[in-house]
Amino acid sequence: MIPIGAGVNGSIGIGKQLHAPPEQAVWIAASYPLTQGAFVLVGGRFGTVYGHKLLVVIAGAWWVLFNVLSGFMTNIPSLAAMRALCGVGGAFMVPNLIALLTINIPPGKGRNIAVGMFGAMAPIGAAGGSVFPGFFVQLLPWKWLFFFLAMFGAVIFVVFVLVVPGEKEPLDKGGKIDYFGGYLGVGGLVLFNFVWNQAPIVGWTEPYEYILLIVSLLHFVAFILWSKHTKHPILPLDIWTAPSFGMMILSAFFTFMAVGIAIWYIELWELTLRHYTILEVGASWATLAVGGAVAAIVSAQVVRHFAAQYMMASGSLCTSICLILIATMPAKQIYWAQVFPALIFLSFGPDFLFTAAQIIASNTVKRKHQGAAGSLIGTILSYGISIGLGFAGTVDVYTNDGGKHVLKGYRNATYLGIGMAGAAVGIALLFVRIPKDRREGWDEDDLP
């Protein structure tokens, strides 16, 4: 999440240095979670076949390489491309890290705490990543932001290799990988996301927007049909047989889209309307880091005492309240009046939701499918944040009267986020029915 936070807070400043408007600079923020969310779909399966720790090591080296290359780019398209390739590394790391966690720690209180701490890294990482651009974009040439991320990541990955245990052997050694299904799923996700994040820049009058949208939808249909008939699908069909699993995923997707909208428009509000410096914006995100740490502790404790639908609904409701506070802000106002409480609610929103969804997924599916389950939740988180920017940006551009009423466009975009989070609350309460999980240890059929 650090690269996502760095991309969001650094995008406007880097865009100005590269002479690009905010609607183009959004690609610096959106390209990384786009590919992380899309390719995470296949990342877990590769880990199941070749070993989760091995995949993290390879993905980490890839991630470092493309952060270094990002620093040498000279325009928005090339920088966005390097960020997207860097996101591929993140995509292969996330599900395999989650799988290592859930494989090494059996169901129970210990796993709930560990998953809660992992979930806390989302707001803490995003907030921490938002601080770095203040130093490296405002005070130094922007390329040093990406050089720093590469050096920081290299140190972390070396520690990971030395400290974190891997499996004795891959869970499905010698297993098949559905490359064609992976292409259909990833291709559909990338094209669909590209269309929506490009729409605020070129508008829907461009023919290629409609063509690519249709092609992406055809990819999704083909992916579903292919997955029904292939022997080794990227997403095993029995994952979807868990009670309320589909509705849980839908609720989570709506909420994470709303989270992306909240993060982006807090950023725009502070930079373009209130004229904060990048360093001041980074400092303002400290609330999210502290709140995220508290939320992780709380979520790990309450998940064993409350049914999943109530915890998920609480996370979506917190996100909705955050967006209501943002949508009703005046152009000029002190930080403490509405941004501060909005960030407190935002820290609890995705943390509650991610922890509940990840624990439900990891406790519901079989041990051999932990990588696939982690991939699916990772897809929902990163891809939701990225595609939410595209939807909101389209509403913003088409309702701000050609840029004459910037505040009007911002408000309408946040209204969209409120609707998404509100829908997620309703879905969780009405359609998600998963009992409290009080297991301690693996079920007999999950033992190796």
Image (cartoon, grey):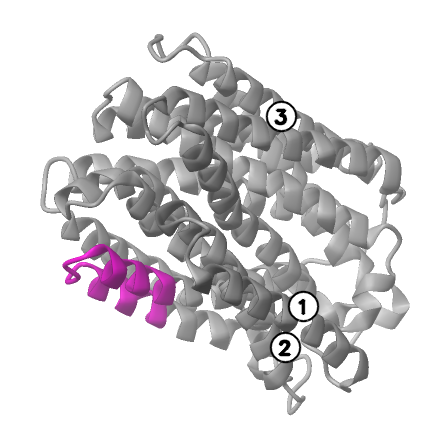
At mark 1, the secondary structure is helix
Disc 1 or 2, which lies upstream in sequence? 2
In the image, farthest residue toward the left: 140
Name the residue at 42% across, 40% down: 126
Labels 1 & 2 near each other (Cβ < 8 A):
yes
Residue on which disc 1 sits? 372
Residue 62 shown in magenta: yes
Q: Can residue 398 be seen in this view?
A: yes
Q: Nearer the viewer, residue 324 or 406?
A: 406
Residue on which disc 3 sits? 320
Q: In this view, does 257 lie above or below 151?
A: above
Answer with left or right where residue 112 lies relative to residue 101: right
Name the residue at 77% across, 87% down: 231
Name the residue at 70% across, 71% down: 221
The quarter holding residue 166 reads bottom right
Which residues, given as a range, are shown in magenta? 61-86
